[in-house]
Amino acid sequence: MNKKTLNLNYKIVCDLIEKNAKVLDLGCGSGELLKILKKEKNINSLGVEINEDCVVEALENGLSVIQGDLDKGLDEFQNDSYDWAILNQTLQSTKNPEFVIYEMLRVAKKCIISFPNFAYWRIRFYLFLKGKMPKSKVLPFEWYNTPNVHLLTIEDFFEFCKKRNIKILKSIYLTRNKARSGFLIRNIANFFCEQVIFVITKNI
Amino acid sequence: MGNKIYSKTLILKLKEPIKLKCGRTLENIEIAYETYGKLNENKNNAILVLHALTGDAHAAFYHKDSEKPGWWNDMIGENKAFDTSKYFIISSNILGGCKGTTGPSSINPKTNKPYALDFPVITIEDMVNVQKKLIDYLGIKKLIVAGGSMGGMQALEWTIKYPEIVQKTIIIASSARLNAQSIAFNAVARNAILTDINFNNGNYYDKKHPEAGLAIARMIGHITYLCEEAMFKKFGREFKDKPNFDFGIDFQVESYLEHQGQIFVDRFDANSYLYITKALDYYDPIKEHGSLENALKNTKSKFLIISFSSDWLFTTKQSKQMVNALVKINKDVSFVELESKCGHDAFLLEFDKQTKIIKSFLRG
């Protein structure tokens, strides 16, 4: 992801989270987002990350982080023990996204899920015109080495939540350097937006 | 750096007897300890490092009469993981040991002879209680504890027992309790000693020591400290020379174990080996407190737990058990499984990544 989009993504996530919240960042990488959240929102945080080098970097960033595999579940976390669970640009690389989302909904009151939109017009045209698996700055990998084994679209996610009675509190659509929320018609967003950030919760 | 820094083992004599978990009381306890770095004015920069089964108080720097530095010299010193320019580092020999702290080879004041098997059976909890006396003597009220293997169990016990004192806890290649497999290895090791022809019910101090038994115990230990891959890398199937078609030392790996066994009997007491492995086997805060969550519920410490991928003696699963309990009760914990091909020994060898991690953890 380019720096600008990344910063925009971080800023939006940061704006969503209230001060002093308890935040679980799943797939936290080296902890860039948590670092920002700690500084801006004084959050109480924990990161979960599968990659050893990233865990070491996150620790060097002064964060509390646990090495673990999201696909194995969040057994150690109690129900509703976090205000927020974040899955930032990670959903598409989990082996069992449905299970991961259910686990997030279980352990946190609210969840933030962001992912690259595979129905973005450039991606559609890439496949249409070149007849090859689309690549972009957001999706830089080849078909044979991509960690993104569950690519999806904005429309897919709406459908997914509807079928499971998961409540969508917010959807924020990102183009290269702009964020829009609420106003766009889903179909248009699904075509024009490169990324999306959803805020979801259990429908009680 | 350049110049060798020297350290010296000091002795603290306790005036008060200590009541042990087994119900008996132990008097005239002496604690062998070393310190590195300076205790600051507020006395809040102390780190207690806790040694493993056969370690001693000499954790860092050099002794005048030896070329070999302390057992954690790679981790303790200026700019190292445990930075002596910032922290005051304390290391003491455990109760029941044979490196200066009172143990079965110490003189029993009542008989003027070594205790041998009259020494009471000690536990990890007893070791920690003795260490607490040293910490009190040094006037320290806030403490960071760190240890690998059995040292990790002591660190765990410290934070359970003294939640008001322990600020940070580092547990490396360790577990809340041994599994049946590890107890089995210890049992075999003890049997090797107990059945040695020279064991003489522990009263061997003025005679020939049970060296063969202790050497076998050490060999078993060394097998468990390595892993298949480490052994393959170190020895493969290489012969020392050529096959001899007898039952002498043929393979390199045999030669290594023989050597490790031999050098060990010169520096360790067989009775201590019995007592310490028993303490390891007995330690079980899960049973003691009903659950690990319950054991840890009053802790105020931040935790760092490290395991190694090829360690099959103290497994990642066992580390995760502690991590999961801490997460469940909302404690501040970090965990990493470091990739290593060194088996359990990794905690003494893989110091690059450990240094990075521990430094960050201590800073945070």
Image: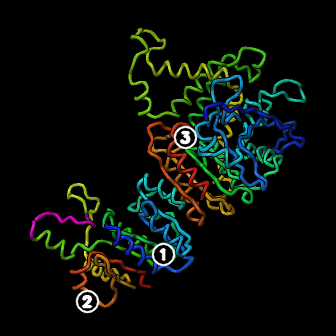
Residue at (54%, 43%) from the top-left corner?
A: B314
Local SS, label 3: helix
Residue B109 position, x and y percent, is 89, 30
Asked if residue A138 is among those painted magenta in the image, a careful observer would answer yes
Residue labelled with disc 1: A84
Q: Badge 3: few (under 14), some or many (20 or more) residues near its Cα, within 10 Å?
A: many
Quarter of the picture containing the N terminus of chain B is top right
Q: Tell me, yes or no, if residue B318 can be seen here.
A: no
What type of secondary structure mainly makes up the magenta span? loop
Q: Which residue is mark 3?
A: B347
> Residue at the spot x=73%, y=39% of the render?
B92
List x then y, in percent, for residue A200: 40, 80
| Residue sitting nearer the eye, A2 or B271 | A2
At x 74% / y 42%, what residue is drawn? B127
Judging from the image, mark 2 belongs to the subunit labelled A
Question: Against A53, is B108 above or below?
Answer: above
Are labels 1 and 3 on one chain? no
Q: Secondary structure at mark 2?
A: loop
Tell me, for residue A185, which label it has, or none: 2
Q: Quadrant of residue B42?
A: bottom right
Give x and y (percent) for residue B277: 65, 35
Task: Name the chain under label 3.
Answer: B
Q: Secondary structure at mark 1?
A: strand
What is the span of residues highlighted in magenta in the rendered image?
A129-139
- Compute the Cα span from label 2 to label 3: 57 Å
Residue B246 is left or right of residue A174, and the answer is right
